[in-house]
Amino acid sequence: MLTLVILLLVLALILLAIIRYEIHPFLALFGGAIGYGLLVGMDLKLILQSITEGFGGVMGSVGLLILLGVILGTFLEKTGGAMVLAEKVLSWVGEKSINLSLMLSGWVLSIPVFGDSTILMMNPIAKSLSAKSSVSYAATIVAVSLGAMISHSLVPPTPGPIATAGILGADLGLVILYGTFISLLALIPVHFFINRWVSRIPLRPTVVSINQEISHQDRPKLVASLLPILSPLVLIFFASIANYPSQPLGDGKLKELISFLGSPVIALFIGALLSFTLPKKLDRKLLAATGWLGEALVAAAPVIFITGAGAIFGKMLQNSGIGSSVTTALEGANWGLFLPFLLAFGLKCAQGSTTVAMITTASIVAPLLSPLGLDTDILKVFTTLAIGAGALAISHANDSAFWVVTQLSGMSTKQGNLSHSLGTLIASISAMAALYLISLIVV
């Protein structure tokens, strides 16, 4: 019980450092991990061992995945390929279903691109479509933001789900499959919420301007824009099938090749290489330290190091023997998937970052998978998605996405809370409900 009290105290101090004193999450998590080890009386050599094993163990796989995913998204964004995908989704769904079109566009774009970037990129279209119709600008931009946040939390290769799956040892192919399905189900109640509630907020765009930085002639074609995203997803999915215990593809060279190409690192590396074909002319400067590749490295670094610090925290918990303490404390309780969900939910509400909430929760839950009865292959996948569902909500004043939405649209803080913030709560509960129902069928 004392170990659990110390864990709660350390978590409170980490949140205080991040929220009140604005200390970087990497330093807060790293310092918190060492402080926890010292407070519970761990051997000093074991503390050092936990740091080395935790950081090194996650960097070789998860760190590379995050980096490659960010490189892919950066080239897709900079070349205008992301806008090609968004405009195609809009043409398929049609302007008559403006909110649905924008929500699906945000959902698609936020799989390879950061959520905030997706909202910024799609804002000119959301503003223009609102101006051309009677639909509230609040509805159009919130449709984009909620679509983006749902896939950002549940569908790799966005950094949060990749890091969480890596820390928990979940099959990335199954995370993609179930995450896609659950996130699409979560869009349904969100769509009704936007149409029935957010559309009533009287907000009109003041200035309509479409981003013309990248001309249509210089943008890549639709197929070229899709390849960097779909190729790694398909490869990872087929590798999951090939590695299934029943061995549907046999046990020969074909299976070995598919498993290699579909390993997350190789699949995303292929996706990143394909993204290099998107510029009209690939200037070597784009791959330099000062080019797009350099920008991607800078953008990925904070997420990678926060993931590493979270892994150190998780390894420290594991080596402290907290698993047996939790087993005793939770004996007779049946928390299941709801504990990781509630942990992620609370951490997201408290400090604002979806990625930090997911990584921190995964680090806490990883050594507890067995005591919680979540240590089977499929339940590791569902635990990853439960954490993603919890980290969806609630996006409010401490989340950058909240301010991106309100400042771009001119919404008041109250209007932002009643639309974007409330929408993330609905999305979070809907995703968890869908996940729980599916778990009852599958498990």
Image (cartoon, helix red, strand yellow):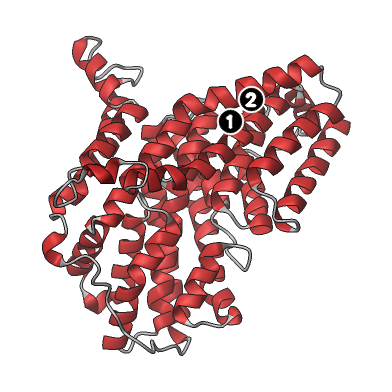
Residue identified by numbered label 2: 370
Residue occupying image coordinates x 82% and y 17%: 43
**Secondary structure under the numbered disc 2 in the rendered image:** loop
Which residue position holds label 1?
374
* Residue 301 makes an appearance in the image: yes
Identify whether 72 is placed above or below 416.
Answer: above
**Quarter holding the N terminus?**
top right
**C-alpha distance separating marks 2 and 1:** 6 Å
Measuring from the top left, give residue 260's x and y in whole percent.
28, 20
Q: Residue at x 35, y 62 (%)?
A: 106
Residue furthest top in the image: 252
Q: Is residue 359 above or below residue 434?
A: above
Circle 2: residue type: Ser
Q: What residue type is labelled 1?
A: Leu
Q: Residue 8 carries which label?
A: none
Q: In this picture, is 281 found above or below 288?
A: below
State left or right for residue 424 relative to residue 361: left
**Is the C-beta separation of discs 2 and 1 under 8 Å?**
yes
Q: In the depicted view, which residue is nearer to us: 1 or 41?
A: 41
Question: Number of callouts in the render?
Answer: 2
**Residue at point 84% right, 31% down?**
3
Give the structural element (helix, strand or loop) at label 1. loop
Farthest residue to the right: give it.
2
**Residue at horizontal 46 percent and vertical 73 percent from the top:** 193
Q: Quadrant of residue 167?
A: top right
Crowdedness near tag 2: few (<14), some (14–19) or many (≥20) residues, C-alpha within 10 Å: some
Examine the image and state in which quarter residue 141 appears: bottom left
Q: Where is residue 235 in the image (x, y as percent from the top left)?
A: 26, 31
Q: Position of residue 290 (x, y in %)?
A: 36, 47
Between residues 152 and 181, which one lies in front from this camera angle?
152
- Along the line of sight, the residue nearer the viewer: 283 or 180: 283
* Picture coordinates of residue 183, whole percent (x, y): 41, 53
